[in-house]
Amino acid sequence: MVRLGGQSAVGKACDAVKRRAKKLLKKFGIVQDEHKTRRYLGGMRPDKYYDSVIWRDLGETLQILGFTYDSGFDVFSAFIDIDDDNSGEVGVSEFHKWLGFPATKFSERVFGILDMDGSGQLDFREFMIGVWNWNTYDATGITKLAFNTMDVDQKGAIDLHEADAMLRMVYASRKADPLLLKQIDINGDGEVSMEELQQTVEEDNSVLAPAFQLQRMLRQRILGVRYWEQETLRRQTYFAGYDSGTTTSWDAIRDILAIKHRERLEEEERQRRLKEMEEEQRRQEKLQKELKFKEEMARRRRPNLASRRRGASFPRMTAVGGFFFDFE
Ligand SMILES: [Ca+2]
Ligand SMILES: [Ca+2]
Ligand SMILES: [Ca+2]
């Protein structure tokens, strides 16, 4: 079995149970939520900081990526858990300490994906976008990422030596595995194409097992595997067009954010116009009503006038025994 940092399946299950128990205990107030006692940047309580700084500045981006106010707070809570020294940023060592295993070239590479500006530190914006990006990769996305680490000139194929380096990086292992290489080079031409790697992973994703495990771990720690499986489907549906090219690059994310931002503005404009139209309709209806009311009033007045006129022109009063009788 392939392990990341030596944590066994039993250990992982225990961790998951512990986390769930902790959450329940907090929910029912049995243990104190450290986020209520902890102070973050500016001496603010994390929930206050999230509300007045994070949601204010990054609420739109969070929503574009499908987070709600609450799920966004869960991501933020993970971030400040990792940010051990309260610096407002997460470094490689803090990241690995939180994951619970020593850095490998591949996990550093994943950290590098999260670190958009290459500063070596993740601010919360990089963290949330990066986590979303990495956790919503499907098998193709992860395969592309592994492949692109070697195919630097993007010619779509890597030689066996490079494929070997890629596998050793993913597995954090020094030894080559000639059998595995042979398995990946399906047509035996001495090169591994993206298609060959993809086909191999489709048949048996244990080829890139540590990469999938690292994703699973991050998914478990932040919002849970089920959440990310749904989000991965959403990404495939909504963002398919942007992901078809270079899935692993930030360009795709930037495109997605820009497009979604534009869509949001367009939607706001559409809503504004709809509201205007509705208001205009209401105004017209009100005018019609007023007009009808006036007409009705006029119509009601008319017979009265007519009868009054009739009464005035044909007085038929007869005096009988000193009394007047109206015979009309
Ligand atoms: Ca830090
Ligand atoms: Ca950075
Ligand atoms: Ca080949």
Image: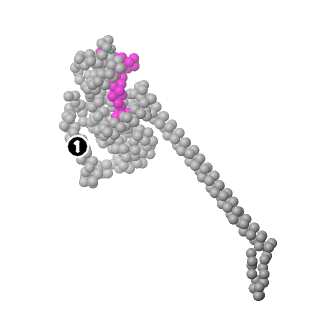
| The N terminus, quarter of image | top left
Crowd around label 1: few <14 · some 14–19 · many ≥20 (10 Å): few
Secondary structure state at the residue bearing disc 1: helix
Q: Quadrant of residue 192?
A: top left
- Where is mark 1, residue-wise? 17
In this rendering, position of residue 7 left or right of residue 318: left
Residue segment shown in magenta: 131-160
Outermost residue on the top side: it is: 189
Vertical comparison of 222 with 315: above or below: above
| The C terminus, quarter of image | bottom right
Residue in the image at 37% along x and 46% along y: 70
Answer whether residue 119 is visible to the viewer in this image: no
Main SS, magenta residues: helix
Answer whether residue 152 is magenta in the image: yes
Residue in the image at 27% along x and 25% along y: 204
Q: Quadrant of residue 250?
A: top left
Q: Position of residue 298 (x, y in %)?
A: 71, 62
Q: Quadrant of residue 164?
A: top left
Image region (quadrant) for ligand 3: top left
